[in-house]
Amino acid sequence: MDDALELNEARARKLVAVPAATVAIAYAVVGVVVSLVVGYPLTALFFVVTAVGLFITLSINVKQRAPAVALAATGSHPVTEADEPRLHNLVEGLCVGIGLQPPRLRVVEDATANALAVARSVDDADLVVTRGLLDRLSLVELEAVLAHELARIRRGDAFVGVLAGPVLGGGGQVFPATVIAPITRAIVGRGEPIESWSDLAAVEITRYPPGLVAALEKIAEADPSAAPPAEPSVAHLWIHGARPEGPYGEALSRVYEAPPPVGQRIEVLEEL
């Protein structure tokens, strides 16, 4: 688990640094060329120095902004223990068992059954569930879904996923997706199918595969493209849902593996 977390933390740093460096280098090159052409070589030094500042500013801005943008895109609201005692009790119990700082809990008032995690770090995260998930799932099924999302937080997958929005063009178009995605793919690579791993991790936590199988079956009963009303920048974070379309969806597919169909995920779990 520690090795996987370190790999994800390194991948998150690259995911932020590569686009920021691309923009900063392009800015510096253009500035230096123009300065030399017009005959002001000292101005070229100015562009190099400010390019370093641009790189730092972009990197910090994306890293700090991404979680807030993702949470806002979900349309969720925070819930206290008094509001949702069952939800809080389940999460706290699971966190004690795996040695994880309990995330803040939020609910989307939507009838679809779904969940996602938004993380700044392992110890600073939010877990979002829909009203439909709370209403439709049994205690055992809900525990399995929560374990799935907590596993993503513990392993660092949630933080990496959150960065995809602003980096690859969702959630504000910080970088041009069609330009940044190929460069990011070449340096960062493509991620592994996170949902498949998280399914297995959830079962390891709960020690009851049928719980997650039943939960996925209920979640998938609706239209596969159905997801809570939210921005495309968080579509890939839900435990089940359609990939966003357009330039951002294309950029995302180059860097992140799409999750396998729910039926395939269930087949794997049933073999355990």
Image: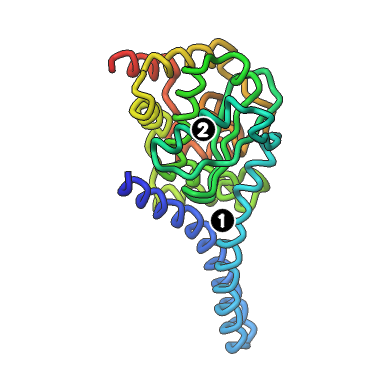
Q: Quick check: 210 above or below 182?
A: above
At x 49%, y 25%, the residue is 145
- Residue 161 position, x and y percent, is 50, 42
Return the residue nearer the eye: 83 or 227. Answer: 83
State the scheme by which the image is colored.
Answer: rainbow
- Residue 260 position, x and y percent, is 42, 24
Residue at the left extreme, as displayed: 272
For mark 1, what is the residue? 63
Residues at badges 2 and 1 in contact (C-beta under 8 Å)? no
Q: Secondary structure at mark 2?
A: helix
**Disc assigned to residue 91:** 2
Q: Secondary structure at mark 1?
A: helix
Q: Quick check: 117 above or below 267?
A: below
Return the residue nearer the eye: 87 or 137. Answer: 87
Q: What's the amino acid at mark 2?
A: Val
Q: Callout 2 environment at 10 Å: few (<14), some (14 to 19), or many (20+)?
A: many
Left or right: where does residue 102 sit relative to residue 231? left
Q: What's the amino acid at mark 1?
A: Lys
**Disc assigned to residue 32:** none
Image quadrant of residue 29? bottom right
Give how far apart the Cα atoms at labels 2 and 1 are: 26 Å
Q: Quick check: 56 above or below 139?
A: below
Instruction: Identify the mark nearer the N-term, 2 or 1.
Output: 1
Q: Quick check: 269 above or below 59?
A: above
- Residue 75 position, x and y percent, is 71, 34
At x 36%, y 19%, the residue is 208
At x 66%, y 46%, the residue is 69
- Residue 180 position, x and y percent, is 53, 51
Q: Check the picture and name the quadrant holding the C terminus.
A: top left
Q: Callout 1 environment at 10 Å: few (<14), some (14 to 19), or many (20+)?
A: many
Q: Check the picture and name the quadrant holding the N terminus.
A: top left
